[in-house]
Amino acid sequence: MKKEAKVEYGITITKPWSREMYDHNEEVAENVKSMLDVMWRLAVDRCEDSREEDEEDDREFLDMDWSLASPEMVEIQKAITCYGFGCGYSIYDVMEQVEMELDRSATFRLKEIAEELDIVLEKEFIGFN
């Protein structure tokens, strides 16, 4: 007896993947990238705002050592890049790397990042189970 095809979001799940599956996952991927970008920028802004309260340190925020980044920034950075940065990297250096990795991330990686950061998606990726 033939197994009944699974349908998600009105799309029949097939192997190999159908064009509809690729299109759906690409749409979800763009949504995840956008959400991660906003999440990252808000974390950077919050960290920068908290640093501005420290009047003794007049260095430009982006020139500061990565060791001064907030735990929130570090969590997002590690989820996106899969590795950490130590002393010697500026916040700007890490920001560039995070943005480059996010831009180049494959669909399966975006799914992993979203899961790691507990991002709730309106539509989930399909075909990865």
Image (tube, rainbow, N blue to C red):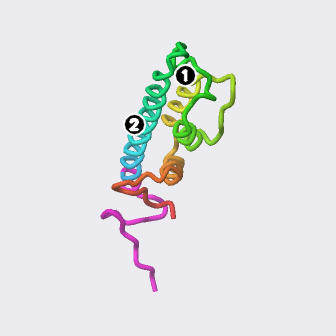
Q: Tell me which numbered mark, 1 or 2, is placed earlier along the sequence.
A: 2
Mark 2 residue crowding within 10 angstroms, few (<14) / some (14–19) / many (20+): few
Residue at (37% x, 44% y) in the render: 31
The residue under label 2 is which amino acid type? Val
| Spatial separation of the CA atoms under disc 1 and disc 2 | 17 Å
The disc at residue 110 is none
Please say whether residue 109 is one of the residues in the magenta stretch.
Answer: no
Residue at (58% x, 28% y) in the render: 94
x and y, in percent, of residue 26 in the image: 40, 47
Q: Nearer the viewer, residue 114 or 100?
A: 114
Instruction: Identify residue for label 1.
Output: 92
Residue at (50% x, 60% y) in the render: 128
Please say whether residue 4 is one of the residues in the magenta stretch.
Answer: yes
Instruction: Identify residue for label 2.
Output: 38
Label 1: element kind: helix
Residue at (62% x, 23% y) in the render: 65
In the displayed image of the protein, which residue is found farthest to the right? 87
x and y, in percent, of residue 36 in the image: 44, 41
Mark 1 residue crowding within 10 angstroms, few (<14) / some (14–19) / many (20+): some
| Secondary structure that dominates the magenta span | loop
x and y, in percent, of residue 45 in the image: 43, 29
The residue under label 1 is which amino acid type? Tyr
How many marks are shown on the rendered structure? 2
Q: Which span is picked out in magenta?
A: 1-23
